[in-house]
Image (spheres, grey):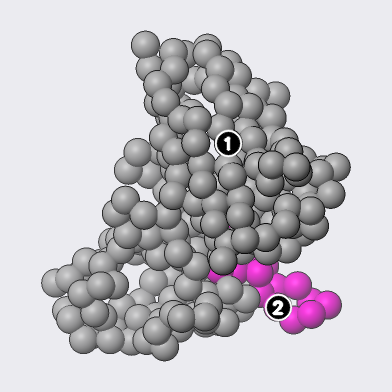
Amino acid sequence: EVQLLESGGGLVQPGGSLRLSCAASGFTFSGYAMSWVRQAPGKGLEWVSTLSGSGGSTYYADSVKGRFTISRDKSKNTLYLQMISLRAEDTAIYYCANSGYDSSAYYYPYWGQGTLVTVSS
Amino acid sequence: DIVMTQSPDSLAVSLGERATINCKSSQSVLYSSNNKNYLAWYQQKPGQPPKLLIYWASTRESGVPDRFSGSGSGTDFTLTISSLQAEDVAVYYCQQYYTTPPAFGQGTKVEIE
């Protein structure tokens, strides 16, 4: 059974940094693209970033490009999202999502429970 | 980038009645080489992550009740709940995965009338 467990969220001041983690189990990272999708309070879903199955390609939404970095540790089966220069508009629940395929855009059968990031002074 | 627009933003339907949600993409998500529409539907209940209902516009995910169905092609799609149940109260999203960035509609809130 595929399980995704996010952690690392919290309260951070504007301009600050945070690193989110997504521990995956039930499947092997290699060969599958992994993504982050966020949801601002009371709002809709917004794709943030995807890391290819090989780990060699990364994709970002324009709203986070240059500020967020997606990466993974294959030995730990863990996906990361390093976030710097955080803004109030980055406040959201961040979900880790897996498509079960190696594609930069696909549908997502697998989601974590999410971790809340709040950017506020 | 492809923009997804859902209608209506919310709807109230009586128990047992049909609920219909529309989704329109700013460009076609039909891939001509395999004749597949790169369109998915999700259900999200409060405090939960989204749940995949439909992919390839009309293929029901395993375990999803058959009262949920998807239709449409090209730029216009529909999610139909044939007989609304109390547990179907949720927000529903469409998503295109034809191209990067994948994009979601703004959501449609379904309530009981």
Task: Kindly identify the residue that appears in the image at 16 percent across and 79 percent down.
Answer: B14
Task: Kindly identify the residue that appears in the image at 58 percent across and 42 percent down.
Answer: A22
Do callouts 2 and 1 mark residues in contact (Cβ within 8 Å)?
no
Residue B51 vertical placement versus B37 (above, below): above
Query: What is the quadrant of residue A82 in the picture?
Result: top right
Residue at mark 1 = A21
Is A15 on the left or on the right of A24, as rendered? left
- Residue B105: x, y in percent? 48, 56
- Is residue B60 visible to the viewer in this orientation of the structure? yes
Residue B10 vertical placement versus B85 (above, below): above
Query: What is the quadrant of residue A121 in the picture?
Result: top left
Task: Kindly identify the residue that appears in the image at 32 percent across and 43 percent down.
Answer: A42
Q: Regarding mark 2 in the picture, which secondary structure is present there?
A: strand
Q: Regarding mark 1 in the picture, which secondary structure is present there?
A: strand
- Residue B49: x, y in percent? 42, 54
- Is residue B76 visible to the viewer in this orientation of the structure? no
Count neighbours of disc 1 (C-alpha within 10 A) and say few if under 14, some if 14 to 19, many if 20 or more.
many
